Amino acid sequence: MKAIRRFTVRPVLPEPLRPLSDLARNLRWSWHTETRDLFRAVDPAAGSAECDPVRLLGAVSAGRLAELAGDEQFLRRLAEASADLRTYLDGPRWYQDQLAGGAELPAAVAYFSPEFGVTAALPQYSGGLGILAGDHLKAASDLGVPLVAVGLLYRHGYFRQSLSRDGWQQEHYPVLDPNELPLGLLREADGSPSRVVLALPGGRSLHAHIWHARVGRVPLLMLDSAVEENAPGEREVTDRLYGGGSEHRLLQEMLLGIGGVRAVRTYCRLTGHPAPEVFHTNEGHAGFLGLERIRELGGTGLDFDAAVEAVRAGTVFTTHTPVPAGIDRFDRELVARHLGDDGELPGVDVEHILRLGDETYPGGEPELFNMAVMGLRLAQRANGVSTLHGQVGREMFAGLWPGFDAAEVPITSVTNGVHAPTWVAPEILRMHGPCDGAPGRTAPADSIPDRELWDLRRTLRARLVTEVRERLHASWRDRGAQAAELGWIDGVLDPDVLTIGFARRVPSYKRLTLMLRDRDRLGKLLLHPTRPVQIVVAGKAHPADDGGKRLVRELVRFSDDARVRHRIVFLPDYGMAMAQNLYPGCDVWLNNPLRPLEACGTSGMKAALNGCLNLSVLDGWWDEWYEPDFGWAIPTADGLAVDEDRRDDLEAGALYELIEDRIAPRFYDRDGEGLPGRWIEMVRRTLRDLGPKVLAERMVAEYVERLYAPAARAHRATDRGAARRLAGWKARVRSAWPGVAVDHVEASAADGAGGSAELGATLVLRVRIALGALEPDDVEVQAVAGRVDAADGISDAQVFPLKPAGGQDLEGRWLYEGPLTLDRTGPYGYTVRVLPTHPLLATGAELGLVALPAESAGDGAGVFLR
Ligand SMILES: *Cc1c(COP(=O)(O)O)cnc(C)c1O
């Protein structure tokens, strides 16, 4: 029989156990081992698998609760855990110390993301972006950063993966009842649920309720459209993560961006939380938050351009991928229909909105509205997520700042980090000592004897072996096998064999099957008589990606082969719970993306924090922090003129060679006591020297210092009057810019008349500049100098500001001059340029306007010294 209605009966906890409820409802338990152990003790029969306190309290019997209410020892532990949580939530932390030290920091930051991976018990993530967002919240909580996070509550989350008999990915969508999740409903003073409403075309409306999770100190607000006020179609808007067609995605993103700002306003009104001064948007998906804030300001009489200035000042945009599929582009017509007069944001001119998403660069498509482009236009500060990705992002978006070299495109980078207490095995965490909530603490791995460290590694490997067998067994039962056929699974993996892990989503650039390039060679590695290797693989392909599913099937079929199945396994349903045991249990973490498409990659960081060595293409974070003591770099063929097939062959060959010649021999090179001394030394160096760099605390502290603090200062400086003046100034500069020119450049005696000059010599440049309708205060005139290539391109440029030197000449041109020191030998050159300048600009490139000498100027401009 099927129930016609369902609801959740909440447990009534006996008085002495009441604090369990608070402990369950703050997700801090997800990174606090003692609290998790306490919940395990509530119902030891529930097993040690995924911990989910809210579900557990809902399922435990009244008899067991009564028993615990009289258990002195349990109550003592409960009191300790509660006191610990209170101390964690109340004490001043790093952020408060910075404020006390006089730092100008935002009163609050709103952090928007389409997905959040906080714990397996709140499955609202698909992969790296969501997990990173979860780690960002936890580290912000640890550091005391006043963040309010905003996302959507997907009633079906992301899919769960299983396999068909022949290895084809099967997708299942769980039905999530928010009442059974660690969430509370945001309510008005009268007890009714708080609501967000968006107007849709055709007189429809989209309603949402606001759920909130507590991530330590950080509230996470999640908008939910599955409410009765909605028509059936609108109820489905928050059905699943990254599903549905274009219009569905647009509605999700409108709810996230526009509805999200309204949810934050509601939360602040109800709780007294300070209003955010900085809005941080992750990838373009939440970009509509800027439009909602423009609409808010319109109500106060600010016109569109001035409102854009006020909004941009306090906005930070992070781009997370150079892969085009990761960037949302909508039909302009679809956007116009939803954001036009008939839809949401009345009073904001839709033509203005559409211009924000225009791909105004060569190759851009005129019918499309690009969310990343809008994100960059509506954020004064932007960043990529590793040094290499910053560079790639600057090149990718350089078309938005014409006239500037990629190096000057205003996109910086903050390299991602991971939250150690979430990802590090408790045994290793204990070795690190207590967390003190300050960024960059180091690991005392030095004091642990070799034997102890190696034994610990083996313990973790053995735990993984047990878990792999359990998961493999369950997977085979799912695939239709009888228990009696599965005896072989007891012999799968060996706790003493070199273990390589590879787990991630399965977009083609991550090359799940690169390791299968030469199957015989892989087979020999796995079955080596004295130095065998075993490999654990996992990953989900996007449900619409049949190519990805074929890769999964290829890998599954290889690992089903009776000759190798004890040495290579594919585990279905990669997720946080699996990942948490996988990283600590592996010796080597493999990553072989097509360089440079991995923006950062974070799984290797989590592995490193557990003393696992990395074996990776020099992409993302590994390009930045690779050292021979932390692992191995797989040589790549990017930049060579080879086709993809050949490239895969070359890179796979390099991968096999590293494992055969370097990695396996080192792992199995044992001393008289059976210890691999050199390997252990690498583990130690990884824990001690790499560990502190890859922490999310380091990342969040960098966001605070390099992006949030300047954005908060800019926000404060850009009040209504300043926003109006800035918008007016930009309009004036834009229209007058065609009249700006570098007319004449001359250099003093040391000029390379003969084409050469001496190191250390100083040139005095004198230049004449036409400013048209602008004044000297509106511009900065600079000499830009550096090494030149054969085509006279300047690299490693240095900038020398030139100063006004006595008024205008008879033709109305302004004279500027200044010294230029020749501090490099070899081919050297300079040029002169004019940029707009204003105290509220973050960089000279911000407007994308620059005036350079005409190419043909034969009067010394661009004279190159050899
Ligand atoms: C860390 C993590 C990811 C991201 O891994 P990448 O190396 O960045 O691809 C994806 N899924 C899960 C479950 C993770 O824990």
Image (cartoon, rainbow, N blue to C red):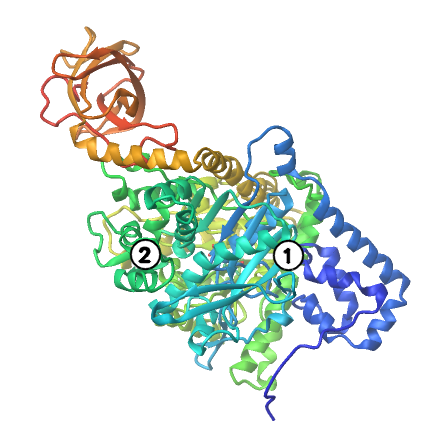
Q: Nearer the viewer, residue 514 or 409?
A: 409
Give the SS element for disc 1.
Answer: strand
Give the SS element for disc 2.
Answer: helix
Tell me which numbered mark, 1 or 2, is placed earlier along the sequence: 1
Residue 214's tag is: 1
Quarter the C terminus occupies: top left
Determine the image quadrant of residue 834.
top left
Q: Nearer the viewer, residue 269 or 367?
A: 269
Q: Is residue 168 visible?
A: no
**Residue linked to disc 2:** 324
Quarter the N terminus occupies: bottom right
Q: Is residue 244 left or right of residue 447?
A: left
Q: Is residue 685 left or right of residue 236?
A: right
Residue 142 percent coordinates (x, y): 64, 45
Q: Is residue 582 visible?
A: yes
Q: Is residue 350 left or right of residue 312?
A: left
Residue 262 percent coordinates (x, y): 50, 56
Determine the image quadrant of residue 350.
bottom left
Identity of the amino acid at label 2?
A: Pro
- Residue at the spot x=50%, y=39% of the render? 708
Q: Nearer the viewer, residue 105 or 509?
A: 105
Which label lies toward us, 1 or 2?
Answer: 1
- Whether 731 is drawn above or below 859: the answer is below
Calculate the distance from the C-alpha at mark 1 to the C-alpha at mark 2: 34 Å
- Residue at the spot x=62%, y=62% of the render? 188
